[in-house]
Image: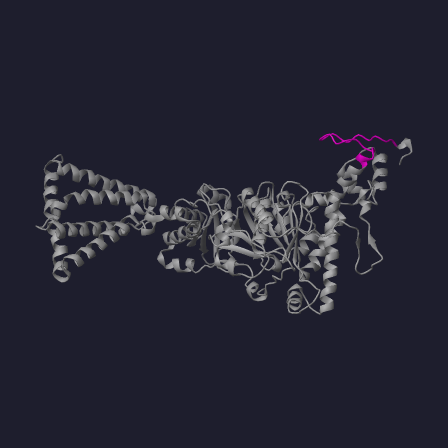
Amino acid sequence: MEVGKPWHEDLHPETKKSVLAIVFFSLTVLTLLSYWGKAGFVGQFFFEILLWLFGNGFFLAPLTFALIGFSFLFSFRRHIYAATLVGGFLFLVSSLGVIDLVLGNQAGGHIGRFVTYPLFMLFDFWATLTIEAALFIAALLIMLNIPMLWFGRKVEESESSSAEATEDKEKTKELAGVIKDVMTEAVKAVKGDTMAGSVEAQKTIMLDEKTKGEEKFSFEKKRPGAAPYKKPPLAILNNDKGTPSSGDIRANANIIKRTLQNFGIEVEMDEVSVGPTVTQYTLKPAEGVKLSRIEALHKDLSLALAAHPIRIEAPIPGKSLVGIEVPNRSIALVGLRSLFEQAAFQESQGPLIFVLGRDVAGEPVYANLAKMPHLLIAGSTGSGKSVAIHSILTSFLFRNSPDTLKLILIDPKRVEQAMYNGIPHLLSPVITDYKKAIHALRWAVHEMDKRYELLSQEKTRDILSYNAKISQVQNTDKEILPYIVIVVDELADLMVAYPREVEGSIIRLAQMARAVGLHLIVSTQRPSVEVITGLIKANITSRIAFQVASQVDSRTILDMGGAEKLLGNGDMLFLAGDIAKPRRIQGAFVSETEVKKTVEFLKNESGEEPEYAEDIFSPITSVSSPDSQINFEDFDSDVDDELYEEAEKLVIEANKASASYLQRRLKIGYARAARLLDMLEENGIIGQGAGAKPREILVRKEDGVA
């Protein structure tokens, strides 16, 4: 305990409330015992005083004490004990006044007479009764901290479906504000009320404020004869669940300060932000303190706080502060519905704005794929990649009709995206075959070239200006161009099978497709340099990193460490192309049930049917040279690598076969070496792999095959 600090300051707020509840319950029992003459001469003296003060309203004293006790135990109020006591006092005084007014003969004791007499002289009977009854009700609400709407909530829920929707919206706002309430409380606990304003000044984060200005134009031009498009209702989505608990914030702040002082680092504690998953304690180091000294103590801080893992952000972008992020004891589940209902999301005009989640301060965070213009998502298995893709796709489906957005979903894993089959936004059924995936990527490159030709003919610079010009022209056969989003749910599988074709198509799209409205979302659970190559990273600058196993993997994704200290379950680091440091965000959770409800609505109620591109799997003729054709039938050949013969010769001559051997001799990457081994196995040159044992060479040099 610090010198000069009151002893009770170290107690947890819930402990203080429990102690006060016990005190008032004890007063209730003692008051009743004094009435029955079971409390000795002190109790008798106490009873006579209460009888003189309260008269026939003596029974209100134990009732008030009991209500105050229950208020401390079950009220939603935090730390504000004076309001409960003031409410109890007003409840007692107003009750005694009503008793004295109605029964007369000083039935409310001297207190009742003191309250009622001047009011009666000024207002007469009925006006006085109205005033005292109003004071009685107000005092009860203050003491129990319960709004009047609470009493009728159950009735409103069952009246009608419209009433349910209204109340659900109110509950959503209430749930969405829980995190901010806790955050404000935390700030007051550490720095006092003066900091509350700075916290409340935080606004919903839209990663690009230019969105509203640049994408105000809405292209909802319908095809002739098409039925009106109905967007899914928000009622099929879930709200936030749970309340984050960070433990004793004041005690943790003191532990951080003392731990740093033990190593000779003087700091001043600053703001505290409670988010859904972590609590960020900010501090200002003394002059001359190197930030590297603080960063080097993350293990010592983790030990002192009994929390693992902690992450140190030094410095926080835009502030002269260092942030220490400590995992919460209990976390809140961020639902899509509360984020969709925010005004920032509802009022924004960009068609490709999507939900990311909530940051360390509990504020909603949104991003605009049109500004990125492509996104790379990577992380270990089970860290939240697929859920993030579902939340992004759900955001798009809730904002766009099939006339403004088309999707190409590539799912080599065969299980994640299959539920989207049949929605009207798809350009093809969900693609699970590797060769069809290559066809689709090449088709996208061809579509990009076609769109550039259209833009050149109309002398426009991007899809926005082209659509704006076409929409203003009457009686034209040209159609508005929809945005096309291509989602690859597992890049590693495609890179192992066809590394050159996949990398070439992705790089071409990433370099040029933004202006014509084609955007990539690429995901992988294997963040290695063979999958996320240097060219892919150079052209996809916006990235999301989920929890990974090592700092090496984090550097592969973000070019810096940090992702290895995440907690999983949607905890992410988001690095936008225009910022230098990643931001920590708790991703929004969308369940499989919510996705299926959305898909069923789009298939049954949207008024649209899927219109697949007929040529998406056909051989593509290049725009620049119409006579040249990309022949995808070559993929059917078992020998489609020019190094195959050389690899076969090396394996037979050395009488051994391994990926590392081929990498060294042929100077190729692991993915290509593994592909060559698979081809050699398929052609009967080598045997199957048997764990750590070397592969058997089935063809000898003397056989004359090499």
Q: Nearer the viewer, residue 701 or 115?
A: 115
Residue 166, image x, y percentages: 42, 52
Q: Is residue 536 rendered magenta in the image?
A: no
State whether residue 659 appears in this view.
Answer: yes
Q: Nearer the viewer, residue 244 or 489?
A: 489
Residue 659, compared with residue 105, is above or below; it is above
Residue plotted at (62% across, 59% down)? 370
**Secondary structure of the magenta portion, mostly?**
loop
Taking the image as shown, residue 573 lies to the left or right of residue 537, namely: left
Q: Nearer the viewer, residue 564 or 416?
A: 416
- For the N terminus, the image quarter is top left
Residue plotted at (78% across, 50% down)? 618
Q: Residue furthest front?
A: 225
Q: Nearer the viewer, residue 240 or 341?
A: 341
Q: Which residues are magenta?
A: 680-700
Residue 607, image x, y percentages: 60, 52
Residue 348, image x, y percentages: 53, 61
State whether residue 568 appears in this view.
Answer: no
Taking the image as shown, residue 505 lies to the left or right of residue 273, namely: right
